Amino acid sequence: MIFDPEKNSRIYDISPVVSERSAVFPEDTPFSFKTVLHYEKGDKIMLSSFETTCHMGAHADAPLHYAKGGVSIDKQDLSIYLGPCQVLDVSSFPFKRLEASVLDNIEIKSKRILLKTNSIKDFNHWQDEFISLSPQFVDSLADSGVILIGLDTPSVDPSEDPYLLSHTQCFKRGISILENLDLRLISEGVYNLVALPLKLKGLEASPVRALLIS
């Protein structure tokens, strides 16, 4: 957390560290890098390159990821990822896939919703089980005017779901997706979100540096 005295605001970094240890979906491309130039080799600058999945760390899924003909990440409206958001702590609900009833007594205060599930214990180790969303949960948020759903897990669908039902429902309802956010130290409330994807032409996702400002 960073305090900005000029604006009397606090900035929370909700992006997991990206490294060679970072967990990825099985068979996806892990993070690796190589150094072309380095001071230890006698070079006057450092120059390196890296390879990894577009879904590394905190990332934005574009519709192209889960819908044939969906737009790529470079064509997404950036205003989706910039503005007021509401963090909801849903970690106490006994559902592996959140049902619409979770929202029965919750006031939706923003069109951007981040869900704190606390179901990922370590971003450096892949786990098959984590809390995800039901299509009905997506519908309920869409009915409240939500345009962005973010959560602290690798996917809005269970890892074993071959049909990507909640991804599909997000596409049908015009909701964009942020995944793998680090919300462990974030309390419920309303914040300003900054989570801009890279302008990667024709690709289906992009890492983001996700920040909350209060």
Image (cartoon, helix red, strand yellow):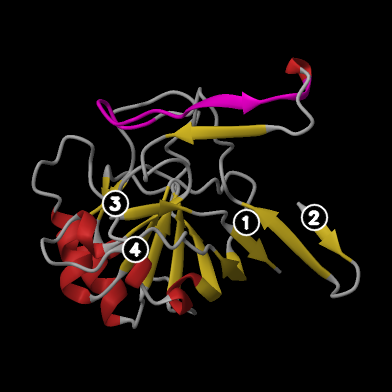
Instruction: Classify 126 as above or below 13.
Output: above
**Disc 4/disc 1 C-alpha distance (Å):** 29 Å
Residue type at mark 3 is: Val
Residue type at mark 4 is: Ile
Residue type at mark 2 is: Ile
Q: Residue at x 15, y 50 (%)?
A: 164
Residue under pointer 3: 156
Instruction: Classify 93 as above or below 72.
Output: above
Residue 147 relative to residue 189: left or right: left
Residue 142, quarter of picture: bottom left
Residue 180 relative to residue 163: left or right: right
Give whichever of discs 3 and 4 has the lower sequence position. 4
Q: Residue at x 53, y 74 (%)?
A: 82
**Disc 2/disc 1 C-alpha distance (Å):** 16 Å
- Dot 3: element: loop
* Furthest residue in direction top, as rendered: 41
Give whichever of discs 4 and 2 has the lower sequence position. 2
Residue under pointer 4: 73
